[in-house]
Image: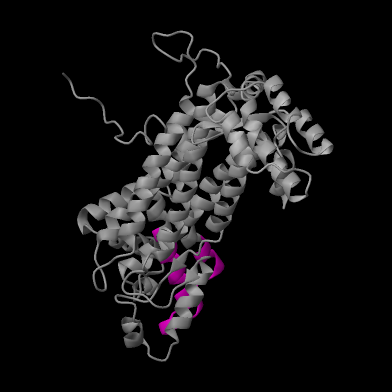
Amino acid sequence: MSPLPEQPISPLDGRYRSAVGELGEHLSEAGLNRARVRVEVEWLLYLTDHELFGSQRLDLEQARRLRELVSGFDQAEIDELARLEATTRHDVKAVEYLVRAKLAALGLSSVAELTHFACTSEDINNLSYALTIGAAVREIWLPKLHAVVDALRAWAVEHRSDAMLAHTHGQPATPTTVGKEFAVFVRRLERIAVQVESTEYLGKFSGATGSFAAHVAADASQDWPAISREFVLSLGLDWNPLTTQIEPHDWQAELYSRISHANRVLHNLCTDIWTYVSMGYFTQIPQAGATGSSTMPHKINPIRFENAEANFELSSALLDSLSATLVTSRLQRDLTDSTTQRNVGVAIGHSLLALDNVLRGLSEIAVDTAKLDADLDGNWEILGEAIQTVIRAEVTAGRSSIADPYALLKELTRGKRIGQQELIEFIDRLDIGADAKARLRELTPRTYVGLSSELVEYLDS
């Protein structure tokens, strides 16, 4: 058997690349290296802009050409970094050498020693990860989440009045509406989205053990914490003044916990929709050319929601592991975070793939109102709650002498199926006021939805 041509190991880089490939712009090795180059270049420009150590401010053209190393970062730089790292055996050092080479080409060798000045590798890495993760979440993951929420909101509004038999503990329960149930998920996800959007992307820039020791040794007259703060903020990040060699990654743990929370809420949505499909409440819209089963031609499987379930689970498992691992570092530094963080793209990628499946799945299902009505009509006993509650009110108001309304309805309905006529006859025999009796006679499982439709309006509050 001849060997296969080189193939991707991860399905995210193979089968599912079309759904998640844009994450590679940020959460790939190349994306990370481009961010590293950006941090190195911007730090060099900061130092020369402030003419530290006798350096001279670069003119606009020199600065523009230096920044082109970032804006024009492409396969040539990727290949060059690979070549450099093969020698240095150190990824950040390879980036430093790449920038130094660019300085030489621009005739700026006089400031070459300001490249990576007073930096430990983690000064570059933590800022680069914050930049790439922030961009991936804000530009790719959050917009996809918002697209799903918007689709759910549209469902909530469109089906706000479609009465549906609810099920608590898997048993028939007080009816709701399809729209209200979708609105619950919208509300849950919107809260989490706000939390994700409020993430602090923290950065440190304070040397080998977070003490600015090398900086002070070079020039004790400078306010290095102020310089560090100004530089980190200039990158659009939040500054962390108290760190070891590494930024402690607490913000990452918080972010991953929030994304994982969103995953689990959406996993709950998927299992509910899958169940509604199996109950016949939702129908699946046939897709041209699609096959549900290799042997059963009639089948349309809810594969979008099943695929989403699995990928939400994978994503949360990875995100939970990241959150647990990244907040611990032995003494002032160990490298457990180094290899762990390289999987951030995989973790968010599985969530993004799941979101894509949910969005596509929602466009491929429809509400079967006939089935909803049939199930409601087959469960008149659920009105027992309404009847016993009305009796309680009548007893309190002095219009009834019934001793134990709950027990009375329990005897009539528990574990039984009763029909409309049987229930009306029971109501007619009740010792309650005429108005209450009339209200109960008019009540049906389809109308016993309370304020379900009106509650959808709270999505705008």
On screen, residue 346 versus residue 149, left or right, reads left
Quarter-of-image position of residue 198: bottom right
Residue 43: image x %, image y %? 44, 70
Q: Which residue is drawn at 34% across and 72% down?
A: 119
Quarter-of-image position of residue 416: top right
On screen, residue 120 versus residue 152, left or right, reads left
State the predominant SS element of the stretch in magenta.
helix
Q: Is residue 455 visible?
A: yes
Compared with 67, 437 (above or below) is above
Compared with 263, 310 (above or below) is above
Is 62 magenta? The answer is: yes
**Which region shows up in magenta?**
36-64
Q: Residue at x 62, y 36 (%)?
A: 408
Compared with 168, 226 (above or below) is below
Q: Is the N terminus in the top left, top right, bottom left or bottom right quadrant?
A: top left
Between residues 425 and 222, which one lies in front from this camera angle? 425
Q: Can residue 57 be seen in this view?
A: no
Q: Residue at x 47, y 37 (%)?
A: 354
Quarter-of-image position of residue 20: top left
Residue 397: image x %, image y %? 78, 50
Seen from this angle, which residue lies furthest right? Answer: 435
Seen from this angle, which residue lies furthest left? Answer: 1
Between residues 285 and 207, which one lies in front from this camera angle? 285
Label count reads: 0
